[in-house]
Image (cartoon, grey):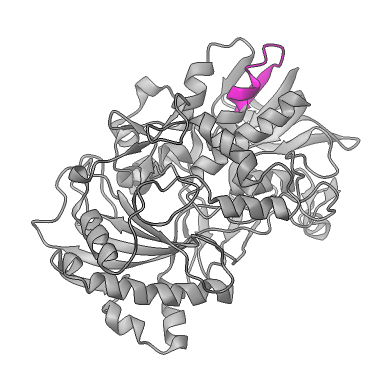
């Protein structure tokens, strides 16, 4: 019997399993639905600074994603492919490599809501410990390298956004991960010597030789086994073995904001009436399992790059420059919005030249809209139903309308105009100037039709105070009402961290592991 089974080897699960296994007396089994791979085996698409082929190429989707998983971004759109990582390292294998800490004010809001030990002051040392960042005031020697590309290597849209944004009054911010400050910045990324460093390489590769850590890939977990109110193991399909029940003294779900709630629901932990309607026996009635789904909606100015500005190297990085700002609208907190340069976008096969369509995106980084994750069936082979419901909250729509005006001002600057044969709003034929003056109802409809997401799903196993009956987990990650069961990943975020989620997920894994080791 294992002491701990960790389900999911993504940004949180890899860090958590590696940390737990530092205790030689604790036997840890890490289960991952996707492939078990080694750093030396990584294809160029995984190593490349350009993640676009890895994200969009159909062959790569079959190997490194959940290829049938769909999500409806807004109420005005049909369900579309939802790229999520399925391999050791999870979405850190396929993401944009962005290494951004959550905003300190966001963590303080978590603590103020009753999540003890999650304030900015409490989590700052955890971020310091996981990073290897040469800038003053940051951690050195941690497992995750933090790299900022020199401006000489930036793409044309990066440079245009910087010039236009500074001219429009946004300040220069030399460190996006500083406790204070906002404005024009270079994106920090998890890269060393020009290649991606995923959670697999950072945390699991160094831990593989430990005799008390076992890693199994191609392990699809159906449900948590529960007896008399206590988790006793998991039911899992193992390659070459079929379905087996694996016992453990404790189970931690780190399968991400889509699959952790799905596993709980299949385990009979969720809204009782809905479970009964699907023929699942109710083990624990926790209505908020699968609710509170949040993601970051993004719109874009599409820039049809002139030939002399179009990238030719397939490893050209898609983005290096961003602009964070505080909108002051809708009751949002500090640094609730972001503008992002895209030097190229769209489908590109491995080795092919990048698509010459660039752009500048505007995204809500403190989202108030909430969606759901529900089961399509009790079968673990069937992906859950994901309704992001983005821009449904008026506060998000208010700030996105404002962002259209900001995009219009940026693309009107000569730095952007000189790049382009034409610049339009999203996939439309409208210029940004035309879009910005649309009647409110027409603009809202267009935003609902054009909005994408940034694949920052969170919140579906919401963390609340120890004594709070609502929510799914307590501040130690323990599922309420079920002994021996925890969740540690983006799903436990009680509110938006206002940043790309990878770094915060690693912090969550480390935090929960530390509490388990101290118990």
Magenta span has 24? Answer: yes
Q: Quadrant location of the C terminus?
A: top right
Q: Residue at x 45, y 49 (%)?
A: 83
Considering depth in this image, is 75 or 172 the residue closer to the camera?
172
| Relative side of 377 to 337, left or right | right
User: Taking 5 as reference, is 449 above or below it?
Assistant: below
Residue visible at 53% across and 67% down in the picture: 390
Expressed as whole percent of the image width and height from the top left, the position of residue 195 reads 31, 31
- Side of 134 where 65 appears, left or right: right
**Picture layout, residue 448 above or below residue 461:** below
Instruction: Tell whether 280 sits left or right of 214.
Output: right
State the residue lying farthest toward the right: 228
Q: How many marks?
A: 0
Q: In the depicted view, which residue is nearer to us: 78 or 468?
A: 468
- Residue at 55% from the left image edge and 43% from the top image edge: 504
Residue nearest the viewer, comparing 13 with 376? 13
289 is within the stretch colored magenta: no
Looking at the picture, how far across and down is residue 52, in whole percent? 32, 47
Residue 395 seen: yes
Q: Quadrant of the N terminus?
A: top right
Q: Is residue 462 visible?
A: no
Q: Position of residue 346 (x, y in %)?
A: 29, 55
Expressed as whole percent of the image width and height from the top left, the position of residue 378 reads 70, 48
Task: Between residue 500 and residue 92, name the one nearer to us.
Answer: 500
Q: Which residues are magenta?
A: 17-32
* Farthest-out residue, bottom: 439
Residue 147 picture quarter: top left
Residue at 54%, 61% in the rendered image: 366
Toward the left, the furthest residue is 308
Q: Is residue 126 above or below residue 319?
A: above
């Amino acid at each position: 019997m294992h002491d701990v089974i960790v389900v999911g080897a993504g940004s949180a699960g890899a860090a958590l399993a590696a940390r737990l296994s530092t205790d030689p007396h604790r036997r840890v089994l890490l289960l991952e639905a996707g492939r078990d791979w080694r750093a030396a085996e990584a294809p160029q698409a995984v190593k490349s600074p350009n993640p676009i082929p890895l994200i969009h190429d159909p062959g790569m989707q079959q190997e490194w994603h959940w290829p049938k998983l769909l999500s409806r971004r807004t109420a005005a759109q049909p369900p579309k492919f939802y790229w999520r990582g399925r391999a050791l390292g999870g979405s850190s294998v396929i993401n944009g490599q962005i290494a951004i800490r959550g905003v300190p004010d966001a963590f303080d809001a978590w603590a103020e809501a009753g999540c003890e030990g999650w304030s900015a002051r409490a989590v700052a040392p955890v971020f310091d410990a996981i990073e290897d960042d040469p800038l003053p005031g940051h951690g050195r020697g941690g497992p995750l390298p933090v790299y900022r590309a020199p401006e000489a290597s930036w793409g044309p849209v990066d440079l245009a956004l910087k010039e236009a944004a500074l001219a429009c009054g946004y300040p220069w911010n030399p460190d996006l991960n500083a406790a204070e400050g906002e404005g024009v910045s270079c994106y920090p990324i998890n890269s060393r010597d020009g290649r991606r460093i995923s959670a697999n390489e950072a945390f699991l590769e160094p831990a593989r030789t430990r005799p008390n850590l076992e890693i199994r890939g191609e392990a699809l977990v159906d449900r948590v086994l529960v007896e008399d109110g206590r988790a006793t193991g998991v039911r899992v399909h193992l390659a070459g073995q079929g379905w087996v029940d694996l016992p453990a003294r404790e189970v931690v779900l780190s399968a991400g904001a889509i699959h952790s709630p799905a596993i709980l629901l299949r385990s009979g932990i969720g809204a009782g009436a809905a479970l009964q309607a699907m023929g699942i026996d109710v083990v624990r009635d926790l209505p908020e399992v699968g609710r509170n789904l949040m993601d970051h909606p993004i719109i874009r100015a599409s820039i049809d790059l002139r030939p002399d500005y179009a990238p030719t190297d397939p490893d050209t990085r898609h983005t290096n420059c961003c602009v964070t700002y505080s909108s002051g609208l809708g009751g949002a907190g500090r640094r609730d919005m972001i503008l992002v340069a895209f030097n190229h976008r769209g489908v590109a096969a491995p080795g092919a030249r990048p698509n010459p369509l660039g752009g500048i995106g505007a995204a809500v980084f403190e989202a108030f809209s909430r969606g759901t994750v529900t089961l399509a069936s009790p079968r673990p082979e069937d992906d859950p139903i994901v309704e992001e419901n983005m821009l449904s909250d008026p506060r998000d729509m208010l700030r996105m309308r404002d962002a259209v005006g900001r995009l219009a001002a940026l693309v009107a600057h000569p730095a952007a105009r000189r790049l382009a044969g034409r610049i339009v709003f999203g996939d439309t034929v409208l210029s940004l100037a035309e879009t910005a003056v649309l009647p409110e109802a027409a603009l809202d409809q267009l935003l609902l039709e054009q909005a994408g997401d940034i694949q920052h799903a969170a919140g579906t196993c919401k963390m609340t105070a120890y004594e709070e009956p609502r929510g799914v987990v307590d501040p130690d990650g323990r599922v309420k009402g079920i002994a021996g069961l925890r969740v540690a990943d983006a799903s436990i975020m009680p509110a938006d961290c206002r940043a790309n989620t990878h770094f915060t997920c690693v912090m969550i894994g480390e935090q929960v592991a530390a509490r388990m080791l101290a118990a």
